């Protein structure tokens, strides 16, 4: 006989919550009192520290990862008549930046094990119009970078990395961001480190880095803090039409403190992931996304994703999410297959069954809370909520 889903706790546990300490409060207040609220010296300091942390020559502070991806395409001259292949299992921003250059978005299948782009399938999708590939390090799992680099070299394609989930990821003993490809990180509120909103573009090329800094602030020839600093006012020129993509000093001050704690954050994420793995092992109808990595790799555990098998479970992903939510535990979906959203179907003619693996993933995945501020009791509450929901509410 069925029974109602029971709340596993008195207060609702959100899907995500940033980890803030008194140290973060202190550096933000110091930044406020300094008088530099917008782009200033803290941004430069954060850029230098972040570049060092990932082994890149340059880092350009931005207001989002989306801005970094857009600039990456523009810096490589991607535009109308071009085609860019990316993953259908990603946030819309990865695709929207392609659209905003005037290029056409294209997709390839994902790995059933990692939900990352499958390089073998990407190769079958290359056309004479293909100019670039954007790989997405889903949930922080590094893509098969050597295979993608070989593929892009062979076909003379640009390779761009969407590292929105990948702060702290390591591939083949090198941090994501160290391989010379234009790589964009996200510091959104739910990410492994946060500046509230914000992003960072890392790269090696000196000229591209200079142009990225011009484009991020309306095409101005000098940053505000250089124009209004102690050396006196300097006239500026508009070199080309740019964007309002700059990072604020307030964000950078917070980012510096969060960067210093990133290893601590990711270690706690790994602990929670291990507890979930043990609790959900062999649970019928649910399969955790693989996060096992070879020696020399590191996974930052941005998300804990479960794949629902509706036939084995007896009900759908959406019903499973509702049950967990009713137990007072927040959930999310990462992600519904992008190509099936109304705009992309209407504008580019994508249809159901174009990418069966990605569509099966998009129809059946959901994510559960995974953030460093979770207590051990929070973790046990999530486990109880998932197990109760998966049991179908039957005694």
Image (cartoon, rainbow, N blue to C red):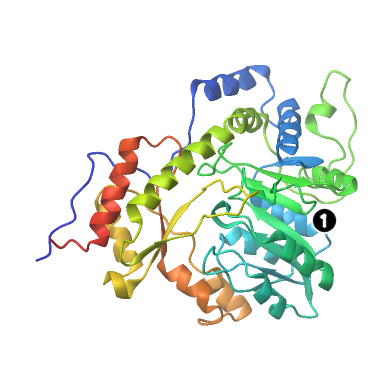
130 sits left or right of 363 in the view: right
Q: Residue at x 74, y 61 (%)?
A: 146
Quadrant in which the N terminus appears = bottom left
260 sits left or right of 161 in the view: left
Mark 1 surroundings: few (<14), some (14-19) or many (≥20) residues within 10 A: some
Vertically, is 237 above or below 4?
above
What SS does tag 1 mark?
Answer: helix
Q: Give the x, y percent position of residue 339.
A: 56, 73
Q: Residue at x 90, y 32 (%)?
A: 235
Quarter location, residue 249: top right
Of the pair 312 and 292, the residue shown nearer to us: 292
Q: Give the x, y percent position of residue 183.
A: 72, 51
Quarter location, residue 118: bottom right
Q: Residue at x 61, y 44 (%)?
A: 167
Q: Residue furthest front?
A: 295
Of the pair 90 and 63, the residue shown nearer to us: 90
């Amino acid at each position: 006989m069925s029974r109602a889903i029971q709340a596993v706790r008195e207060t609702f546990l959100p899907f995500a919550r940033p980890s803030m300490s008194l140290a973060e409060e202190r550096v933000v207040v110091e930044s406020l009192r300094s008088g530099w609220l917008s782009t200033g010296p803290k941004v430069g300091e954060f850029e230098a520290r972040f570049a060092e942390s990932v082994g890149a020559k340059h880092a350009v502070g931005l207001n989002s990862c989306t801005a970094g991806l857009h600039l990456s395409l523009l810096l490589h001259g991607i535009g109308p008549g071009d085609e860019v292949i990316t993953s259908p299992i990603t946030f819309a921003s990865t695709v929207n930046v392609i659209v905003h250059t005037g290029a056409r978005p294209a997709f390839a299948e994902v790995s059933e094990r990692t939900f990352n782009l499958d390089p073998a399938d990407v190769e079958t999708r290359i056309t004479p119009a293909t100019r670039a590939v954007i790989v997405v390090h889903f949930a922080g799992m590094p893509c098969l970078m050597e295979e993608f680099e070989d593929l892009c070299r062979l076909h003379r394609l640009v390779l761009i990395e969407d590292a929105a989930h990948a702060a702290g990821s390591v591939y083949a003993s090198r941090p994501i961001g160290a391989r010379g490809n234009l790589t964009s990180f996200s510091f959104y509120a739910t990410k492994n480190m946060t500046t509230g909103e914000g992003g960072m573009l890392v790269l090696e090329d000196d000229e591209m880095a200079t142009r990225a800094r011009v484009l991020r602030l309306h095409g101005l020839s000098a940053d505000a803090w250089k124009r209004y600093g102690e050396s006196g006012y300097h006239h500026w020129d508009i070199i080309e039409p740019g964007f309002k993509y700059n990072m604020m000093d307030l964000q950078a001050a917070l980012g510096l403190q969060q960067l210093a704690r990133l290893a601590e954050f990711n270690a706690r994420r790994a602990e929670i992931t291990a507890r979930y793995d043990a609790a959900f092992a062999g649970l019928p109808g649910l399969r955790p996304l693989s996060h096992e990595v070879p020696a020399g790799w590191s996974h930052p555990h941005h998300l804990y994703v479960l794949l629902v098998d509706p036939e084995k479970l007896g009900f759908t992903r959406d019903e499973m999410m509702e049950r967990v939510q009713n137990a007072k535990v927040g959930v999310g979906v990462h992600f519904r297959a992008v190509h099936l959203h109304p705009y992309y179907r209407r504008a580019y003619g994508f249809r159901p069954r174009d990418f069966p693996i990605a569509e099966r993933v998009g129809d059946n995945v959901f994510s559960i809370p995974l953030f460093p501020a979770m207590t051990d009791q929070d973790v046990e509450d999530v486990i109880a909520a998932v197990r109760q929901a998966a049991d179908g509410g039957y005694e």
